[in-house]
Image (cartoon, helix red, strand yellow):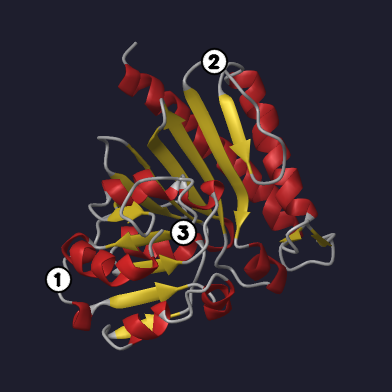
Amino acid sequence: MTTQTIHSSRLQFALDISQRAADLILQHYQSQTLGIESKADDSPVTVADRGAEQLIRDALSEAFPEDSILGEEFDDVVGTSGYRWVLDPIDGTKPFIYGVPLFGTLIGIEFQERMVAGVCRLPALNEVVYAEEGGGAWWKIGRGEPRPAKASAVSELQEARLIFTEPTADRKVGRGDVLPEFLRQVRIARGWGDCYGHILVATGRADIALDPQMSAWDIAALIPIVRESGASCSDWKGDENIFGGDGVSIAPRLRDSVLNILKPWAH
């Protein structure tokens, strides 16, 4: 069995288990059963976050007991296979709590410290975007057939569509001047944050998605998806580092221009 085949079997597992997690999440969406609590960093967590991640972890421990697991809600699992699963059961917990459908379940698959596959399932939209290294990125809506996910060919900043996360996050990390700099140069900007913005770049509906704060589980699944679409997903220095602390997805012809703008704030 080739390494590619092994990647593919894990990707199919991720697609299947993300659907099961989505079904669980939707049982709580726009309901009174969220069980909202605050974590140590004051970010919210719900019973759906914890329940979905536990569901995925339980399935992983049975199917791939030698794989490592890194997730947002529970402790790390250290394995020996060279594979690590990076999980965010609900990326966009705040939109989920508010009843806004722009949240996603992220499952990233890392092999020997390189992200090789990823799934972003958008439960409330009934969409999934996924990729594995060398196999392209794919976008499936409802029961329709998967279609290629392709980045845009926009080459000038003045024609670019920018997606950004809440500007208050920029100020909290001393990057309050970043967004105004982009707003002076791009064609249009919208605040559809979290994974949804990066998926818009991967599917050619936006050209830049900017996040001043990203944890490993926020960005891991997005890196191979955006990469296979022809765009790039990296930290602000331009590295595919899941521990970089920030993130940006960029249509291919804009990459140099965007990273040049970000350079004063990259660290």
Residue type, numbered disc 3: Asp
Residue 42 position within the rendered picture, expressed as x and y whole percent measured from the top left: 75, 64
- Check the picture and name the quadrant holding the N terminus: top left
Q: Nearer the viewer, mark 3 or mark 2?
A: 3
What SS does tag 2 mark?
loop
Closer to the chain start, of discs 3 and 2, is 2
Left or right side of 90 for 257? left
The residue drawn where x is 68% and y is 72% is 99
Read off the residue under disc 1: 155
Are there few (<14), some (14-19), or many (20+) residues within 10 Å of tag 1?
some
The label shown at residue 246 is: 3
Disc 3 vs disc 1: Cβ atoms closer than 8 Å? no
Closer to the chain start, of discs 3 and 1, is 1
User: Quadrant of the rendered structure where residue 115 is?
Assistant: top left
From the viewer's perspective, is residue 221 above or below residue 210?
above
Residue 87 position within the rendered picture, expressed as x and y whole percent measured from the top left: 58, 42
Q: Residue furthest bottom?
A: 184
Residue 203, can we see it? no
